[in-house]
Every structure is written in structure tokens, then in C-alpha cells.
Image (cartoon, helix red, strand yellow):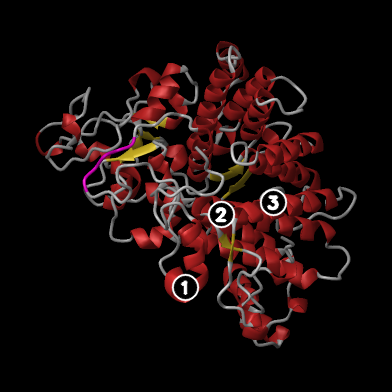
């Protein structure tokens, strides 16, 4: 399938209006100087680089916060848990697979923000076509489109791409490309985009990720290629091998200094999408770390545990006071088991095995007071939001070696590199999250890769991938890799009224409007899904 970027996601002048509303506040004198109707602005009035930062921000809108991930995937892969019965009942979607009032809105969040991000990136291509001096910006824009398309297809399955968003050209009912054809096209296009990056030429400006560093964008592109390739190890191993080897030869991330993340600027109105929810009173109280992740970190004596988790001070009032720090001693951390509530019935948390008891007394008592919650680093509105990291790429390279791909280095060395990268990768959260070199060395030495069998190696690699992405609050990636690898082995929650027949969801249903607005194409796509448009239907690469 040949993809013509110019025709993808074409929105005419709408993107200019979006940019005006997003980035610029003009005075009357400014508008007079421009002397144009802002709803009819032309490319000459804007630097196309500014579309890049808007595209990046919208991508993170798809992968963080109430767009879905913290309310869906965070609990599906048992990174977070919630009793979800008081003000924060919307967390029933993630903890118990039980719908809440706005479930339909949450399930379309990733779709809407992802397409919006890709639209803005594509506007760069539209506006710079045939112009010199924008070669690297165009390559980065293509990488952003591919990043978004991978996200959307991995969450939903078949999606519109080759005919997508061409309403200005009269195409309002685009066909859904199969995920198989889409992955082949995206990998080919990514190869071309990364190959075209030229460090001798000007990099993009208004770049929130790398500040225009073309060399880092090149490493990001190859690391993204590696991630995409490894998605296909079960369904198309030859393609996986070919592109994983190409990515490794091209040069993936070299250290945690290459990590792709964006730090927010709340002063200017840009707030971390996960911090917002956790600063909401009911969310702050009821959202805790899952028992599954806390048990894993304690078993490994992981030094991240004391940075990411705290037991609140005793009592209901203290549990609801975000200004009060808790006890971060690793040995005291206790994860909340998924699937329980505080409603007083058969599924009340007090009935869970090993229930530790309440804290406080009388009207100040709280049943969940001893369970660990995320520390303040996650509530920081300026906290970083992560896209792809050195630790992830090294874990994928370790798996590639285990699977017999031609990649330099040993699986054990890549795994050790990944552990170092995972611990170093906490530093962007601030000085309180930095881990000293001696602690890192001790952890890496104590946790070598088990190379006694392929199965043991794959288990360790992918459990670490789950933990690392989960602790960075990249819940969608933790979930996607769990679907791909089967690790860690998770026990589904069986709760009355759930929308997945008691199974962990493996996709999000399409936005509800698709059936009415694009019925024929939607119906064809749903017909190709085993089981139809359901939470448990497996997408193409999600093979058993």
C-alpha cells in the first residue's frame, strides 16, 4: 500500500485556526499589522515549525490522562488500582472493567487526539512542499504521523489512514486500512523518513522533545522502528527480524540522555495530563499502586520503590490531604489488590486476602489507609510525560538477541543497559527521583538476565518492560507490550457488570460515532475483528 502523505489527514485551513487558538494571543495592533482574517490565514503568515509542538502536545493528549490511559490501561495491566466507589467512580473502567457514565467518551479520546496530532504534523508537509530549508522538519513531521498511527492502530485495530481526513477534498467516509497493510506501510515510510534526516542541515524549531537535535531524532526514529518491528514477532517474524536488525544497525538510543519525553510548563497553561487527575481530590484519595506492581518491585529490591510509592499518614483526613507526605520506606509499601471496593459488600476491600486493617478511628477511619499511593513526583503539573526511552529500546534489543536476530551485543548486556537506563530515566521527575550511581550498580549486579532458557529470558525482559513503562506512567505502552509478550502473567478481575466478560481488555472499541458517520467502512473493519467491535477482540498482531 503506497501512502501519499500530502493526502493524509488533509484539513485545509482548519489547522491554521487551531494553531492560532493554541499558541498565539494577538493584540489589536498585531491583528491590524497582519491585516488578514485569522480564519482565512495562509501558510505565509506562519512558521510551519509551530505545528510540530502542537502535534507533540496532542500526541501526549492521546497517551495520558482522562483521554483513556489512566482510566483504562493503568488498571488493565495492574500498575494502578482503585476502590472506585466514591467520587472517583470513573476508575471502575480500569480497575474492574465496569463502565461508568462517560466510558464512551474515554474510549474515543486516544482516537481523537491521535488524529488531531497527525493532522497538525501533516499540515507541515502540506505547507513546506517544494520549499527548501525544511528537509529535517518534513522528516520529523512524517515520524510524528507514524508515531500517532501506531498508537491508534495498536489501541483500536484497523483504522483509516490512506483515505483519512480528506473532508476538504470531499472524502468524508474513508476506508479502514487493515493493520497488516498499515504496519508494512508505516515501517517502510519510517525507514525513508529516518534515512532522510541530515545532521548537517537545520533542525526543526519549536520542538518540545529534542529542541531541534537532528541526531537525537534519528535515534528516536530507529528506536520507534525497533518497537514497531518487535510488535510483529508472533504474527510476522520475518518482517520483525528485518526491521529490528535495520533499526539496530541504524542506531537506537545510546543512553537515557536520549529518552523522548516532554516536560510541561504549567505557568503557560500546559499541564501534565496524568498530574491533573491525581490532583483531583477523589482521584488522589482512591488511586493507589496495584499489588501486582508493588510486589514485583519488592521482590526485586528495586530502588525505584522508595521514590514512587508512599503509605499515607493515618486517618481519612490525612489520606485526603495532598500536602502531607507519606512514608516511603520500601519495606512498608503495600499494593492495593485490583477488583475491590469500599462499599461494604462481598467485594469490600476488608474481604481481600491479607487485608492489613484500617488506619484512623471513628469518623476519621479509612479502610485503604495502609495501601501505597503514587508520591508527589506524579502530581507535579510540570512532570515529564514519556514517549519512548533508552530502557525500552535496550530491552527490545535484548529480546531480539534472544530470538536469534542479528544484533550486536549480548542479551545480558542489553538487559543490564536497560536496568541502568530505567533507573537513570527517573531523573527527569526531579532531584528527589534521581538514583545515585552506587545504588544503580548494586541493582544491576544483583539482577542479571536469566539466560538458562529462552522462556526465562523473555519473561524477565518483558516483566521489566512492563514495570519500567508503568512507573513512567506510559500505561498504553505497558499494555501493548503485555498483549504482545504475555508478561507479566496477570489474573483478570471478575466483577459484576463488567464490559469484557471478566477478561482483561485487549483493545478499545471504536468511537461510537463511527458506526453512524462512516457506517460501511466501520462495518467492514468490525467484520475483520475476531468477535467484532468488543473490548476483548484481538487486533491483527495480537496473536496467541
Which sits in the foreground, 416 or 386? 416
Residue 314 position, x and y percent, is: 23, 30
- Check disc 1 and report the residue beneath it: 519
The residue shown at (54%, 22%) is: 460
Q: Distance between the residues labelled 2 and 3?
A: 13 Å
Quadrant (top left/top right/bottom left/bottom right) for the N terminus? bottom right
Q: Tag 1, which secondary structure?
A: helix
The residue shown at (76%, 72%) is: 127
> Closer to the observer: label 2 or label 3?
3
Asked if the residue under mark 1 is in contact with the one under mark 3, i.e. CB atoms within 8 Å, the reply is no
* Residue 153 tag number: 2
- Predominant SS of the magenta segment: loop
- Check disc 3 and report the residue beneath it: 184
Residue 78 position, x and y percent, is: 39, 36
Question: Is residue 47 at least partly visible in the picture?
Answer: no
Q: Tag 2, which secondary structure?
A: helix
Q: Is residue 542 above or below residue 193?
A: above
Q: Say how many tags the image has.
A: 3
The residue shown at (66%, 18%) is: 412
Residue 480 position, x and y percent, is: 52, 42
Image side of residue 421 versus residue 520, left or right: right
Q: Is residue 236 above or below residue 170?
A: above
Magenta region: 492-496
Verify whether residue 443 appears in magenta: no
Image side of residue 267 versus residue 333, left or right: right
Asked if the residue under mark 3 is in contact with the one under mark 2, i.e. CB atoms within 8 Å, the reply is no
Which sits in the foreground, 80 or 318? 80
* Residue 87 tag number: none
Residue 43 position, x and y percent, is: 75, 77
Which sits in the foreground, 529 or 102? 529
Amino acid at each position: 500500500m503506497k501512502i501519499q502523505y500530502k493526502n493524509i489527514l488533509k484539513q485545509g485551513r482548519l489547522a491554521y485556526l487551531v494553531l492560532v487558538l493554541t499558541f498565539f494571543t494577538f493584540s489589536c495592533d498585531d491583528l491590524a499589522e497582519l491585516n488578514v482574517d485569522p480564519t482565512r490565514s495562509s501558510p505565509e503568515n506562519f512558521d510551519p515549525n509551530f505545528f510540530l509542538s502542537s502535534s507533540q502536545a496532542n500526541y501526549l493528549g492521546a497517551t495520558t490522562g482522562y483521554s483513556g490511559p489512566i482510566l483504562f490501561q493503568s488498571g488493565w495491566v495492574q500498575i494502578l488500582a482503585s476502590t472506585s466507589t466514591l467520587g472517583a467512580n470513573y476508575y471502575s473502567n480500569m480497575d474492574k472493567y465496569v463502565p461508568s457514565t462517560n466510558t464512551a467518551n474515554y474510549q474515543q479520546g486516544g482516537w481523537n487526539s491521535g488524529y488531531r496530532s497527525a493532522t497538525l504534523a501533516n499540515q507541515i508537509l502540506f505547507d513546506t512542499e517544494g520549499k527548501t530549508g525544511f528537509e529535517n522538519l518534513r522528516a520529523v513531521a512524517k515520524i510524528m504521523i507514524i508515531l500517532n498511527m501506531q498508537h491508534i492502530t495498536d489501541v483500536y485495530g484497523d483504522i483509516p489512514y490512506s483515505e483519512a481526513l480528506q473532508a476538504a477534498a470531499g472524502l468524508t467516509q474513508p476506508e479502514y486500512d487493515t493493520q497488516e497493510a498499515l504496519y508494512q506501510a508505516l515501517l517502510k515510510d519510517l525507514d525513508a523518513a529516518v534515512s532522510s534526516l541530515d545532521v548537517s542541515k537545520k533542525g526543526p524549531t519549536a520542538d518540545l522533545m529534542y529542541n531541534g537535535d537532528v541526531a537525537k531524532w534519528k535515534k528516536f526514529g530507529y528506536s520507534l522502528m525497533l518497537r514497531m518491528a518487535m510488535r510483529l514477532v508472533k504474527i510476522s517474524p520475518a518482517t520483525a527480524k528485518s526491521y529490528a536488525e535495520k533499526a539496530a544497525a541504524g542506531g537506537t538510543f545510546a543512553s537515557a540522555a536520549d529518552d523522548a519525553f516532554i516536560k510541561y510548563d504549567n505557568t503557560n497553561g500546559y499541564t501534565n495530563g496524568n498530574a491533573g487527575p491525581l490532583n483531583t481530590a477523589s482521584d488522589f484519595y482512591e488511586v493507589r499502586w496495584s499489588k501486582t506492581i508493588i510486589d514485583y518491585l519488592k521482590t526485586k529490591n528495586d530502588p525505584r520503590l522508595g521514590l514512587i510509592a508512599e503509605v499515607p499518614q493515618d486517618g481519612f483526613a490525612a489520606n485526603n490531604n495532598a500536602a502531607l507526605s507519606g512514608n516511603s520506606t520500601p519495606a512498608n509499601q503495600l499494593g492495593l489488590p485490583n477488583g475491590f471496593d469500599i462499599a461494604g459488600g462481598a467485594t469490600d476491600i476488608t474481604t481481600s486476602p491479607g487485608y492489613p486493617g484500617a488506619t484512623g478511628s471513628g469518623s476519621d477511619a479509612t479502610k485503604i489507609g495502609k495501601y501505597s499511593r503514587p508520591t508527589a513526583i506524579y502530581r507535579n503539573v510540570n512532570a515529564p510525560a514519556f514517549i519512548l526511552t533508552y530502557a525500552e529500546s535496550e530491552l527490545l534489543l535484548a529480546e531480539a538477541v534472544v530470538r536469534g536476530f542479528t544484533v550486536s551485543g549480548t542479551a545480558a548486556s542489553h538487559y543490564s543497559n536497560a536496568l541502568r537506563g530505567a533507573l537513570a530515566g527517573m531523573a527527569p521527575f526531579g532531584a528527589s527521583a534521581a538514583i545515585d550511581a552506587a545504588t544503580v550498580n548494586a541493582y544491576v549486579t544483583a539482577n542479571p538476565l536469566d539466560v538458562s532458557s529462552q522462556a526465562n529470558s523473555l519473561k524477565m525482559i518483558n516483566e521489566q518492560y512492563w514495570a519500567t513503562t508503568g512507573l513512567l506512567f506510559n500505561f498504553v505502552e505497558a499494555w501493548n507490550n503485555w498483549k504482545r509478550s504475555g508478561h507479566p502473567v496477570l489474573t483478570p478481575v471478575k466483577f459484576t457488570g463488567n464490559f469484557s466478560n471478566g477478561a482483561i481488555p485487549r483493545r478499545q472499541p471504536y468511537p461510537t460515532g463511527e458506526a453512524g458517520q462512516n457506517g460501511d467502512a466501520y462495518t467492514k473493519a468490525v467484520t475483520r475483528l475476531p468477535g467484532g467491535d468488543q473490548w476483548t477482540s484481538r487486533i491483527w498482531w495480537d496473536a496467541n
